Amino acid sequence: MLAGSLLKELSPLPESYLSNKRNVLNVYFVKVAWGWTFCLLLPFIALTNYHLTGKAGLVLRRLSTLLVGTAIWYVCTVIFSSVEHYTGSCYQSPALEGLRKEPQNKQQCHQAGGFWHGFDISGHSFLLTFCALMIVEEMAVLHEVKTDRSHSLHTAITALVVALGFLTLIWVWMFLCTAVYFHNLSQKVFGTLFGLLGWYGTYGFWYLKSFSPGLPPQTSRLNLKQDSYKK
């Protein structure tokens, strides 16, 4: 993010297909990034966690991480919109000329043919950071999963791994494109920090507690729990 932003400020790249907000990756993937992440992680978490633990209750508990992620996505989106609203004004042109006093919000401004300008925290930087890190955290369970290659479960998990890996590559690539082509440095810094905070606040802090969805199961952790139960 920092390197791309520095390049944008010092030596801007020429316009390209990826600098157009209507490019295929942006419209059909990034705009619904949480939807893609949610839909692929749901079966992946369910299959791998049930295969390792055999406990439906634990699987449901782990799937609640997706509900937590949805809440984080929603809350941050509301925060970003509120910040842009309270710091913004309506102008006659994109060059910020001719301040309009009538429109009271972004929607009214656009309907009146104006251009709203406020502190627009980068939602792309936030969401792509959060989604990529969440996928990496959940896929860490793979070294624990052992399946028969001829079994249908192996095929299903392999397909999901390939899909999640491909999705993560898209998120990282579009994160770089966002850094190079869109927003200013401070907007991207705040967006990225929100993404990092959402990730660390859950996987690095809350999920370590007993009253949480918990981390992906690992054999060593399960063995420790079984030993404590026996004692």
Image (cartoon, rainbow, N blue to C red):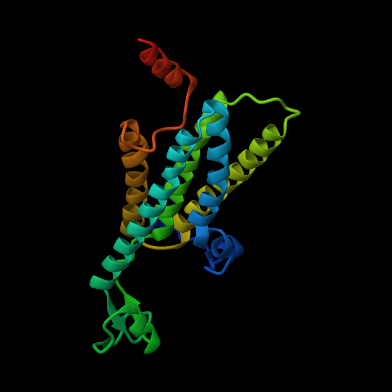
Quarter of the view holding residue 17 = bottom right
Q: Position of residue 13 (x, y in %)?
A: 51, 60
Q: Residue at x 34, y 40 (%)?
A: 202
Q: Position of residue 20 (x, y in %)?
A: 54, 68
Name, please, the residue furthest toward the top.
231
Side of 30 where 156 appears, left or right: right
Res 46 visible: yes
Q: Nearer the viewer, residue 169 or 32?
A: 32
Please indicate, yes or no, whether residue 87 appears anywhere in the rendered image: no
Q: For the point 67% across and 39% down, which residue is it?
A: 156
Residue nearest the observer in this picture, 153 or 79? 153
Residue 130 vs residue 55: left or right?
Answer: left
Closer to the camera in the image, 24 or 13: 24
Whether residue 27 is situated above or below residue 7 in the rendered picture: below
Number of numbered labels in the structure image: 0
Q: Is residue 156 left or right of residue 43?
A: right
Q: Provide residue 125's location: percent of width, then percent of height.
A: 41, 54
Q: What residue appears at the point 56 percent right and 50 percent down from the top-left corner? A: 170
- Judge whether 165 appears above or below 8 on screen: above
Residue at 39% in and 11% down: 230
Above or below, 129 against 181 in this view is above
Image quarter of residue 47: top right
The outermost residue toward the right is 150
Q: Give 146 or 87, whichever is nearer the viewer.
A: 146
- Placement of the C terminus among the 4 image quadrants: top left
